[in-house]
Image (cartoon, helix red, strand yellow):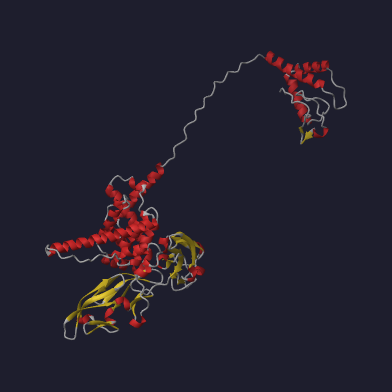
Amino acid sequence: MAFSLTSKQVELRGSWLVALVQQPDASWAFSKLNLNEHIGNKDGGFDATMGWWYHTALEWSCRLRGPFLYARLKTTVGEWSPETCINLDLFVKNRDGGLEFQKLSDSLLLHTACLTLEDNKILKGLVVGPDGKFRVSEINLDQHYGNIGGKFEPASGVYSLSGRDFRLEKNLDSIKLIGELQDYGGVHRPAEIDLSLCVVNRNGQLAFCKPDETPNREHWKTAIAEQIPVLGSAVAGLHYPQESDNEVSPHPFPPSILSLCHECRVADAYRANQNNFFYEIASRTNSATVTVGIALGAFIGRACGSPALGMVIGAGLSTTPGIFLEDRFVNAVEDPAARSQIREAMLGNYVFETLRDMVAADHASAAAELLGASLDPKIDEWMNGLAAWLEKQQLKLLVDFSVEGMVKKVFAKLKGESVEEWDTALAQLTTIQSRGTTLDLKPEDPPIIIVEEAATPAVEQPEEAVAASVAASVANEAVEAAKEPATNGEAPTTNGEATANAVNKTTTTPASSSARTSKTDLKGGSDKDKSSVRGTAPCSNKGWQSVIGISMWRRGWSRSKQQRVI
């Protein structure tokens, strides 16, 4: 039970549950469990008494959400059912550092909640079925218990007609029916009997079995204190703390004062035991959040008379992030009352969602009635003790609101009623989060200042100076070309001729020059022996003179790059 409390990095890989599990020496080790061998499909719902659910599941729908396993299963008519879930914390436990599946216990002490006695003879309560859901079940004790000489006798009947003042007394290892029965002389005498000896949980229904047929009575101490390593004893202690009942020594004070002193001593001993449990959980987990989650879940389960329910809620609260931590959006609310209401709504919504997934849909309203009727108002006193212990540790993870009131609102939502205070608080939180997200802009980079120098205005030169400069450049290129030896078999041009040609070219009118240039481009470089219009040297690579109609030329590697004038 409650494997998630001592596990981390929990994953679902196909049908395998894998996790890092805490060992008895507080170290961590890898463990895995094939859920397909222990959980089955019963007409579209999970069943912990069968197997091979994974073969009838829609593969992409299989997932884990906390300790809950979700999937869509195939029904008996071949259709896909709506998404269903089962809480693995009810069935999977950490046994000596390894994951182990345990079948649903028959014990009345473990997988039940809110057991009450109606009309002195009807035992009624919530019982966990094979699908991991709580359902309302009842049994008529008058059909199985009788009165023999002023004592309860099992396998008999009609005890209620000869008795009075019947009630239930629930302890750690027993659930007793207590009352007064008439003896043979008609005198009422105190009598009691442990119902857990013969009343069992049989596949989600309360049933009676003979004393010699009663299975092993697994109770809370063996299920939690011994099965959860490291934390088990402290967690079990929060559900059923051992109160000190030391007798007060003789004293000359009046009995009323002595009674008050005795109550104070008992209360002090209770607080000391409870603080020891808080300290043990906090020191072993090194987390105040886990301590608060476990304690709050234990108190809810204790107030509702269901250790299993409290353990599941506590494990979820301690492993779900963000429930007890300070939130910047919540702290943005200036009104303390509104801020407290928002935190109450957040915590209450989680408890409601957990209960909703653990109670059968068609039994939700009846289950809420039973839970509300059995709620112990002392839960606020228990929570005040936790708040005082946290204050001594200089921690503030709880806010000032009534846990009893929060749980009652949870039960109201379970009935289908609307809690307007929570709706308003959560709407306010959503507005603040939306506004904060919108205004949560990253600071822009500082602007880069670029100083540009003022551009110097261009000075127009006369046309004569430009023409002279171009002529001089062309003449220099011609002189350099004349110095190179001819490579095409013709005689090299003399310096004088090159100069004269260059002068003639420069004196050509612009119109004739552009016409000659266009004519040369259209020829595609077919004139291989003459220099180009740009005054470059003749091309020596005859095979490279034309590529797709575009003139190509290449200078020799030994020749320096010459300046071109366009």
Residue 254, above or below 427: below
Quadrant hosting residue 47:
bottom left
Residue 329 position within the rendered picture, expressed as x and y whole percent measured from the top left:
36, 47
Give the side of residue 501 with respect to residue 206, left or right: right
Residue 404 in sight here: no
**In this rendering, position of residue 107 left or right of residue 182:** right
Q: Find the residue positioned furthest to the bottom.
A: 184
Image spot of residue 57 (x, y percent): 49, 67
262 or 533: nearer the viewer: 262
Image coordinates of residue 415 in percent, x first then y, are 31, 64
Query: 286 or 551, which lies in front?
Result: 286
Residue 63 lies, in percent from the top left, at: 47, 61
Figure quadrant of the C terminus:
top right
Q: Is residue 530 above or below residue 350?
A: above
Residue closest to the eye, 148 or 235: 235
Q: How many marks?
A: 0
Residue 59 visible? The answer is: yes
Q: On the rendered image, what quadrant is the N terminus found in?
A: bottom left
**Where is 174 relative to 537, above or below?**
below
Taking depth in this image into account, of 252 and 315 the one nearest to the observer is 252
